[in-house]
Amino acid sequence: MIKDFNSTIYLMERADNEGISYHELMAMTPTVISDDIDKSAEFWQMRDYSHVKAVSTHPDLSDDATNAFAEHASSNRSRGADEVTDAERDHAEADSELLAEHIDAGTVDQYDYVPMEDTTFTFSLF
């Protein structure tokens, strides 16, 4: 992370950009890092804020934190306006936990995103 980066401001602005509160954003942050502002900011710099029901088809849910979760950008953007399946959300949550474990251990350079189509992998730190 860039020295002198103000993680708290980044997280507050990120939450504001998504139409949610800072506390709602932090509640979506994996617990292994949620008590560390710098690690939480690093996590959100590597994640999209995905909507279960697309904002384009459900604008009333755009600022509803219960309609959102953290997800790798490629999965979020390739889905477009399609609604998120339970399997996709489960995959995103497991992948986010893996990323958070790597951030916490200082091994984020060893993190590799595995798309949902590749179901032969398991999530583990090592």
Image (cartoon, helix red, strand yellow):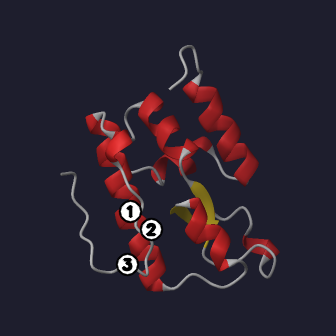
Disc 2 on helix, strand or loop? helix
Disc 1 on helix, strand or loop? helix
Q: Residue at x 57, y 42 (%)?
A: 45
Is the residue under label 1 in contact with that under label 2 (CB below 8 Å)? yes
> Vertical placement of 43 versus 66: above or below?
above
Residue 124 picture quarter: bottom left
State left or right for residue 56 relative to residue 90: right
Q: Identify the mark at residue 95; answer none if there is no mark.
A: 1
User: At which x and y percent is residue 68?
Assistant: 59, 66
Q: Identify the mark at residue 125; answer none if there is no mark.
A: none
Category of crowding for the residue at label 1, using alpha-carbon neighbours closer than 10 angstroms: few (below 14), some (14–19), many (at least 20): many
> Vertical placement of 10 versus 121: above or below?
above
Category of crowding for the residue at label 3, using alpha-carbon neighbours closer than 10 angstroms: few (below 14), some (14–19), many (at least 20): few
Mark nearer the N terminus (1 vs 3)? 1
State left or right for residue 99 relative to residue 68: left
User: At which x and y percent is residue 99?
Assistant: 37, 51
Residue type highlighted by circle 2: Ala
Q: CA distance from mark 2 to mark 1?
A: 5 Å
Nearest the camera: 27 or 80? 80
State left or right for residue 123 relative to residue 80: left
Residue 90 picture quarter: bottom left
Residue 121 picture quarter: bottom left
Taking the view exactly as shown, the residue that stands out farthest to the top is 4
Mark nearer the N terminus (3 vs 2)? 2
Disc 3 on helix, strand or loop? loop
Nearest the camera: 36 or 80? 80
Q: Residue at x 67, y 85 (%)?
A: 82
Q: Which residue is mark 3?
A: 118
State left or right for residue 31 relative to residue 21: left
Q: Which residue is mark 2?
A: 92
Category of crowding for the residue at label 2, using alpha-carbon neighbours closer than 10 angstroms: few (below 14), some (14–19), many (at least 20): many
